[in-house]
Amino acid sequence: MMYVYLDNGATTQVDPRVTGKIIKYMNDRYGNASSLHFKGREAKKALDKARHTIASSINARADEIYFTSGGTEGNNLILKGVAFANREKGNHIITTKVEHKCVLESCKWLEKQGFKITYLDVDEEGFVDIEQLKNAISDRTILVSVIHGNNEIGTINDLKEIGRICGEKGVYFHSDACQSYTKVAIDVQEMPVDLLTLNAHKIHGPKGVGAIYVRDGVKIEGWQHGGFHEMGIRAGTENIHGIVGFAEAVKLSLSSKHISYMTRLRDKLIDGVMTRIPYVRLNGPRGEKRLCNNAHFSFKFIEGEAINGLLDDYGICGSTGSACSEKTLEPSYVLKSLGLNHEMMNGSLRMTLSRFTTEEEIDYVLEVLPLVIRRLREISPFKEEQHVFNRDA
């Protein structure tokens, strides 16, 4: 039996070359970057080098990059830090209904602190309603937060257009780019984005490390207090071995060859599923407006948990949606925002590739998945002739 990992939207395997760097800074170069002796200077040099690597990857300045423990902390820090630092200007924040859970939960918490939150709708492919955004911005709005590449359905929002609107209105613009980072070109000099959230473990780096970009001049308040680490924005001894691993993962991921390779396999997977299996919906857009590694489907008459259970028996790892949400019994709020009914939301399957995914693995999935779907439908209480569903079927 072949083993196939297609849950790279949840996390990726650490590249062995990244692991080598991490071990080096755990075993030999283990100093604290705040220490003044040679071990500390060694760690500080590595920290500065990594900061420059992350900054150059998005065409930012090194002093605009702050390291965190990952995407969740980064999104919390930006939303809460900007909100409280700019409270004199206003108390209104705009986001979308399809953000990562940590953004939505941060916004719910901010509502309890007296902030007003507007949650924008999306269309049937997951794109932000631009006109609704324009109408929602008021003189009390301080921040707009819109995800770049959706973690569940792969939709890539237009940061240039959204940023342009925010810039004209004098409002800060933040984007969660954890899923899109290194898979979509990001240039903060061309994209009018003020704040970004990045992380390592989606790009074959270690878990527990990430970064935020804060454009020079943006008012933000730190939430973790202590020493003057990360230029006073985030106190705590820096995770040097993790940060070095993060930077190495970035260098290894920045290749158009990786993107074109994953795109080709993604399209092969999508086309294979859509032509071999009836009563299936592709969630999210096709083509260049979709993350190069994301394929997300809804199958009629069956449940996603059952699909994943049988795929697991065949050695295939997928997910029913975002790994942060799939342990709940509630249907996906992202799919609900697309207008899907309960049956289609419950019959969802997300498969996310990486640069380590092989063509042979995709061929294997395209052999197994139709068998799994057929087997489950044979025992389903629903009858196909009672339903009509024809989008991309």
Image (cartoon, rainbow, N blue to C red):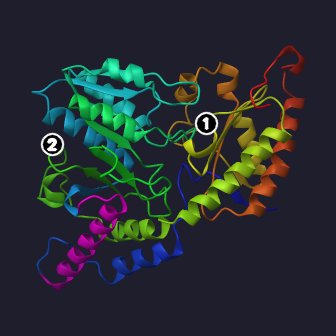
Q: Quadrant of residue 76?
A: top left
Name the residue rendered at 19%, 72% in the picture. 33
Q: Residues within 10 Å of mark 2 (few under 14, many from 20)?
A: some
Q: Identify whether 187 is placed above or below 154.
A: below
Label 2 SS: loop
Magenta: main secondary structure equals helix
Name the residue rendered at 17%, 85% in the picture. 38
Q: Identify whether 55 is placed above or below 108.
A: below
Q: Residues within 10 Å of mark 1 (few under 14, many from 20)?
A: some
The residue mark sitting in front, 1 or 2, is 1
Counting from the top left corner in percent of width and height, residue 97 is at: 45, 26
Name the residue rendered at 17%, 43% in the picture. 218
The residue to which callout 1 is attached is 285
Counting from the top left corner in percent of width and height, residue 1 is at: 82, 62
* For residue 125, side relative to residue 240 (left or right): right
Counting from the top left corner in percent of width and height, residue 221 is at: 15, 42
Which sits earlier in the primary sequence, circle 1 or circle 2? Answer: 2
Identity, as a three-letter code, of the amino acid under mark 1: Pro
- Is 50 inside the magenta-drawn segment? yes
Dot label at residue 221: 2
Identity, as a three-letter code, of the amino acid under mark 2: Glu
State the separation of the CA atoms marked 1 and 2: 37 Å
Q: Residue furthest top?
A: 386
* For residue 281, side relative to residue 166 (left or right): right
Magenta range is: 37-61
Dot label at residue 34: none
Name the quadrant of the C terminus: top right
